[in-house]
Amino acid sequence: MSFLVLMTGGKAGERYRLVKEKTIIGRHPGCDIVVDSGSVSRQHAAVEMKDGGWWVEDLGSRNGTILNGEILTGQHRLEAADEIGVCDDRLVFTVGDTTPSEWVSLGGETDESQAVFQSHDEESMIVSQLDIPRPSADEGISQNAEAKLRAVIGLNRALGASLSLEEVLPRLLDGLFDIFQNVERGFVLLNDVKTNRLVLRAKKLKNAEEKGGLRLSLSLVNKVASSQTAILSADATSDSRFRLNESVVDCNIRSVMCVPFISGDGVVLGVLQVDSRDIQNGFSQDDLEVLAGITGQAAKAVEQATAHDEKVAQEQFKRDLELANRVQQGLLPSVPPKIKGFEVFDFYEAAHQVGGDYFSYIPLGENRLAVVLADVSGKGVSAALVMAALSADVRYTLAIEADVAKAVTLLNASFMRSGWDDRFATFVVVVLDSTTNMVSVVSAGHLPTYLRKADGSVESVGFEEAGLPLGVDPTYAYEAAEVTVDAGSTLVLYTDGISEAMDHKNEIYGLKRLEEVLSEPADSPAAVGRRLLVDVERHAAGQVRSDDMCLVCVGRPKDTE
């Protein structure tokens, strides 16, 4: 009996028994194991039974599959405790009745191998424990370690001069390898405040060519973090309970020191572990005292570096948003176009976040004009980037294909090929013909386009012909609806920043109220648009918007012949 155990996300700990000859892992709901993440491909990887064992392979995914910290190429036979990385999610291959609680994976951003915690009772291995005080300015190193004091002082100076975690953590490990000559592996694990899990942030190996998944003791790390004590652990290979433990036997770990990072407020920031295979020269009580003193000083550096990194990240994020906003604004039309017999009114106001709302006017010859409006799913810089790419693709597609329905069909296929994964966009295009006063409307899952007639009646245009949003089905064929725009009639296009504007009771504006406002007397597209905006603002009553507001009204004034 074999399983894949999901180690990350909201379903962490869930087991998937391998009962089919081939198990598909991916984002698509039809997969055997569904990993709901935008970076995961629809069919990402597969685990297949052949030659009496289980094999894993990547299915041509966009971001690749990781096996034990290395990019997977071809098929690879799985062994117990192998870890499969599917973007930010990880699954562990288990054989037999191993329960999910026996395995905890270390995640986090690292360009090296990930580590896997393995759970075992290690009480009999503990040789010594030390209480770790909160860091203070006058905290010192044990006098029993005078021989190593100079190296320790040098390390503390190096840490004090470091600003970011990218500097602090490698310098810390480098210094420890200098101080403790028998150290062969060093790991720094920091607590992720979002998931409340320890994350591998830095490592150093004396043997740089060491391969395979790195395994650390869950029992030891948990004890160190929960008790806030430094622990010296003895030879694991001498304990009969570990003789069948592949990770311990393979690594041949003889001596381990594990120490917590504790903030000035008494919060555990993470854990530092160093270990050795040297049976003749294991760690001593003095070594543990030295490491405890170093870690106390290092905790200050970690706190300061974390605060520095957060500030830098916030400033960078702010700059990115400002840049994305400028790019987004630069793609929007500065003034409405002029087309004989028609009047155009538009309004755009960005929310406090950069979004994916977009509108444009595209001339299609002397007497034809395309009015385009779209809303890319999501928020932030990524949505704005997709919007920018879409805007360029729209112009190209409408230029090469005169049939507007076929043009949108081509646009959808191109959107799917762009590899936006789970991104989609609602989209509507209206093509005006000033010679016939005819309008063609194609909607890709967008909100209803309304035609307000001269007598005040309001009807939706293209509702029956409306198709799927862009990015859902690459083979979908769109249809166009056609309508004559008489004098005094106005077409109204908008995004959900208008129809879903919230009041202080979290009640949305809604399509019903929108239709009611459109039916009120108005003699021009501009009058229709301004009345609608005033009513939406009245409904919102100053509430902070979470979405862009975009509105385009195009029609023929009453005095148009």
Image (cartoon, rainbow, N blue to C red):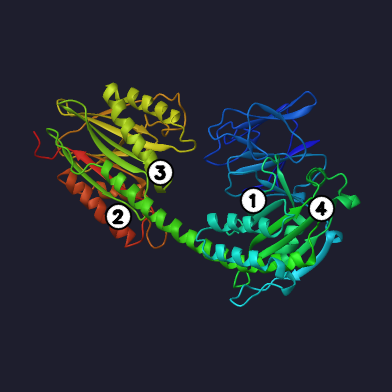
Q: Earlier in the sequence, mark 1 or mark 3?
A: 1
Q: Quadrant of residue 280?
A: bottom right
Q: How far apart, in angstroms, are the residues tagged by discs 3 and 2?
A: 25 Å
Q: How far apart, in angstroms, are the residues tagged by discs 4 and 3?
A: 51 Å
Q: Amino acid at mark 4?
A: Arg
Front label number (2 vs 1) = 1
User: What is the x, y in percent for residue 459?
Assistant: 29, 38
Dot 4 crowding, Cα within 10 Å, few <14, some 14–19, many 20+: many
Q: Earlier in the sequence, mark 4 or mark 3?
A: 4
Q: Is residue 340 above or below residue 187?
A: above
Residue matched to label 3: 383
User: What is the x, y in percent for residue 379?
Assistant: 41, 48
Q: Is residue 103 above or below residue 556?
A: below
Front label number (4 vs 3) = 4
Q: Amino acid at mark 3?
A: Ala
Instruction: Report the residue at 29% width, 48% height from top.
Output: 326
Q: Is residue 481 visible?
A: no
Q: Earlier in the sequence, mark 3 or mark 2?
A: 3
Residue matched to label 2: 536
Q: How far apart, in angstroms, are the residues tagged by discs 4 and 2?
A: 70 Å
